[in-house]
Image (tube, helix red, strand yellow):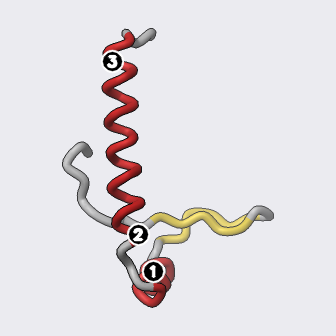
């Protein structure tokens, strides 16, 4: 399925807005707050490259 230029632009804008929101939310946390959230994250996988975890940082209106 090919997206039109308008759909790609909208998709890009939405993705950029999400990344910006997450980046800002993480940036506003202190080191201690960030450490606690990392510790609370659900481990998804552990392998040779390290550990992958998931943590719901906030409810985003575009979800």
Mark 3 crowd level (few <14, some 14–19, many ≥20, 10 Å Cα): few
State the image quarter where residue 55 is shown: bottom left
Q: In this view, does 11 lie above or below 61?
A: above
Q: Which of marks 2 and 3 is nearer the N terminus?
A: 3
Residue at 40% x, 13% y is: 3
List the residue tagged with mark 1: 34
List the residue tagged with mark 3: 7
Residue at 68% x, 67% y is: 46
Task: Kindly indicate whether the residue at mark 1 contacts the one at mark 2 (C-beta within 8 angstroms).
Answer: yes
Q: Residue 62, percent across and down?
A: 23, 43
Residue at 45% x, 80% y is: 34
Residue at 55% x, 63% y is: 44
Residue at the left extreme? 61
Mark 2 crowd level (few <14, some 14–19, many ≥20, 10 Å Cα): some
| SS type, badge 2 | helix
List the residue tagged with mark 2: 26
Which part of the image, by quadrant, shows the C terminus? Answer: top left
Q: Alpha carbon of mark 3 to alpha carbon of mark 1: how far?
A: 35 Å
State the image quarter where residue 1 is shown: top left
State the image quarter where residue 6 is shown: top left
Quick one: 42 or 15, which is closer to the camera?
15
Q: Alpha carbon of mark 2 to alpha carbon of mark 3: how far?
A: 29 Å
Image side of residue 28 versus residue 60, left or right: right
Q: Residue 11, percent across and down?
A: 36, 28
Q: Earlier in the sequence, mark 3 or mark 1?
A: 3
């Amino acid at each position: 399925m090919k997206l039109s230029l308008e759909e790609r632009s909208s998709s890009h804008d939405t993705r950029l807005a999400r990344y910006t929101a997450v980046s800002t939310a993480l940036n506003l946390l202190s080191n201690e707050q960030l450490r606690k959230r990392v510790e609370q994250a659900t481990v998804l996988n552990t392998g040779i490259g390290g550990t992958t975890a998931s943590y719901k940082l906030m409810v985003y209106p575009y979800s």
